Amino acid sequence: MIISRLEGTNILKYRHLALTLPEDGLIAISGPNESGKSSIGEAVCFALFGRTFSIGPDELEKVVRWGEGHCNVVLDFRVGDDDYRLSRQLDREGNHGAKLHRVGEDKPLARGVPQVAERLTELVGFEYEQFVESFYLAQREITTPHPHSRAVKIMAGVAPLEQVADEIHDEIREFEEQREEVQTEIESTRQEIDELDLEEGRLQRLEKEREETQDEADLVAGLREEIIERLGVYETNKQEILRAESARSRASLLRFLFFLLALAAGAVWWLLGKGAGMPLAAQLRGLLDQYVPQWQAVPNQWILWGAIAFAVLFLLSWVRVAAKSGRIRALRAESGRLVETLQRAREIDVAFEAEQPLLPSLQAQEGASVCELPEEGDETEVVDEPSHAPEVEASPRRPDAGTLELLVDPMSNGEATLRQVHDYVEPELEWLGWVQEQLQAGVGDLDQAIEEERERLRQAERLNQVIEGLREKREEIESRIGLRRTALELLAGAIDHLSNNFNRDIKDLVARLLPRFTEGRYEHLKVDEDLKVQVFSAEKRDFMALDEVSSGTQRQIMLALRLALSQKLLARKVKGKQFAFLDEPFAFFDDERTRNALAALAELGDDISQVWIVAQSFPEDAGVRFDVHIQCERGQDELAVGVSQDA
């Protein structure tokens, strides 16, 4: 970037300022204190960046000349083969405007302060910070540039890497925050699982308890059905037994009658036949003649057949009596099975006592047995029950076991009356029905408890899956953090490498410039990572710190370092030729040092081809020719200089 024209109105010291400048050479600015020399450099700085070195961005109204309401400045410059014009306006109200366009074109490249700043950086390759650390030396003590300033980092080429590193640090902080959030979610989810109060094996125990309770309910239901069925059989068999006994009684009577008739007929036949000579036979015949006169017409053989017939009837009656007796015995045996069922039902309390049934509330109600009823007046302790235990109502009274013992033999023989049987069986059935209801209620409660437990397990499984997903997310975040930390290590290595190369290059550049400034007295330098300089003394044959040499030599070394930084920035960021503005660089220089410095500046080369040098005065025999010499005077508020003006 080469400045070709600077024109301003009401800017700093000047009411009007107009400078037309050559593209190459030395531009000298001289004059006494407070003559406006530094105002020219600050006008250039303001035109380019909207601020100056001595006036901060919060007090820009000081750029406006005292007593005036606004100022404006126009700067023409060349970058490569293109000419540009940058104009800027400012008033005391803080209204600030800027416009950038190519010379000869009406359409601006950028309009507005931020837009112009962005476009200008793209054109010239540097911002304000790099400018004041390299090409622009303000009126101040020349010091070592801050090694960690953005300008030096850009010159070293580490600024983009550090920007990337800063972005990676930001990403790591974001990922660490995400990791903390994920960890918080994991702990919260674990707390939810703990609140489910899961117990290992609880579901299996509930399922086993439910199965056992259901088996007990089925057992009671089966006994009730069996009792009802066998009660019906008993009632039916009772009628059958009565009918069979009645038929057996009749058959027994007929059997006896047929026996007598067969015996009588047999005796008559014998007495009338083979025993006719017996006195009893004569008596028989007399009776027959008296009561049955026609008996002699009946053949004796028929009497025999009658006796045989009555004997057969006797035998048939005997068989019938035996058959009815067998029928009665069978019916009584079948009816006696009711007793067996009732006795098995009676054993329920024994079974529950032995196996500790799964319904503690029933046990409490039954006095440690679901089948033992509390006596009247007994006080039962109230015990907290598990959530799946049913609320048991008062049980119906069960018949006494002694009653069943008294009925065993009559019922086994079928001799117990239906009233006696019903008086025992009906309360027993009612009690068994109540037990069945309680057991089924327990099964229902257990089903609910099992479903609740399964739901807790399903919820725990879902929460565990959530935790697993969160763990995977945390591992992924940690992997990303690790990857970025590895990237930071690599960037740190690259930054260290670039910094070492930068320090080496700066040392080499300063070593080439310094002998020109010091007439060869100092040639070798050391530049550490903090840009601290040590100079080699041939007399002491060792490196010395800057505070060990004279102030003039210090400024010579610092000027060489500043120009080396400028050349480094040129090599890295700036395209084409560049100007440099040095405000009072020769303070504390004697004439000899000034001549040497001027000679060195005149021979900087083609890269920095336009050098502005501000001093109160220059030696008469400076040894160099100024292409433009601008002379400033106190009280002068207008300054116009053309290319043709000489020193």
Image (tube, helix red, strand yellow):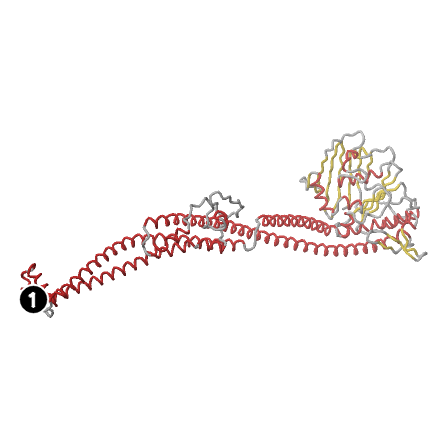
Occupied quadrant, residue 115: top right
Foreground residue among 118 and 465: 465
* Residue 540 position within the rendered picture, expressed as x and y whole percent measured from the top left: 94, 56
Left or right of 8? Residue 323 is left
* Residue 106 position within the rendered picture, expressed as x and y whole percent measured from the top left: 68, 39
Left or right of 450? Residue 609 is right
* Residue 45 position within the rendered picture, expressed as x and y whole percent measured from the top left: 78, 41
The residue carrying pointer 1 sits among few (fewer than 14), some (14 to 19) or many (20 or more) residues within 10 Å by Cα, namely few
Q: Residue furthest front?
A: 279
Compared with residue 34, is residue 514 higher up or lower down, i.e. above or below? below
- Which element carries disc 1, helix, strand or loop? loop
* Residue 113 position within the rendered picture, expressed as x and y whole percent measured from the top left: 71, 39
Foreground residue among 182 and 619: 182
In which quadrant is the C terminus drawn?
top right
Residue for badge 1: 299
Foreground residue among 644 and 84: 84
Foreground residue among 320 and 478: 320
Compared with residue 39, is residue 574 higher up or lower down, i.e. above or below? below
Q: Amino acid at mark 1?
A: Pro
